[in-house]
Image (cartoon, grey):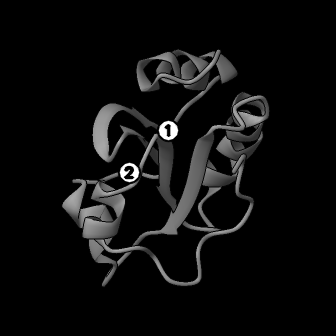
Amino acid sequence: MPYAARHLAQPPSRDDVDRLPGATVVEFGTPWCGHCQRAQPLIEQALKDCADVAHIKVEDGPGQRLGRTFGVKLWPTLVFLKDGKEVARLVRPQTLQDVLDALPANGAPI
């Protein structure tokens, strides 16, 4: 599952995220966040050749528990998981290289 352009209608539970197999990028943000909008082309380009890396977009904000369980403070925050365990984190990526540098820690085929 490559790049996901839209946020999930219903975010997964933390237990579901902790049980995810393989490599996953969980992206926290909102559709209206300027920082999130600027990062989308970078994230999409970085993930375009990563067919075995799942990308989950979770809308964050008041009343959204999943982001709190990960300690998300700024958007976008990318949490890189390997078999449900956090292996890297990237907050407000500024360049494509920022995202690419985080992917190898996740075991992505780059």
Q: State the image coordinates of residue 106 (x, y, percent, origin top left).
A: 44, 26
Q: In this view, does 34 lie above or below 52?
A: below
Task: Give the residue type that dot 1 points to.
Answer: Arg
Circle 2 residues within 10 Å: few <14, some 14–19, many ≥20: few
**One can see residue 9 in this view:** yes
Task: Give the residue type that dot 2 points to.
Answer: Leu
Q: In which quarter of the image is residue 67?
A: bottom left
In this figure, which residue is indicated by the disc labeled 2?
A: 74
Q: In this view, does 73 lie above or below 8?
A: above
Rendered-image quadrant of the C terminus: top right
Q: Which of 46 and 53 is in front in this view?
A: 53
In this figure, which residue is indicated by the disc labeled 1?
A: 92
Circle 1 residues within 10 Å: few <14, some 14–19, many ≥20: some
Q: Is residue 44 above or below residue 28?
A: above
Q: State the image coordinates of residue 100 (x, y, percent, origin top left).
A: 60, 20
Residue for point 75% across, 40% down? 44
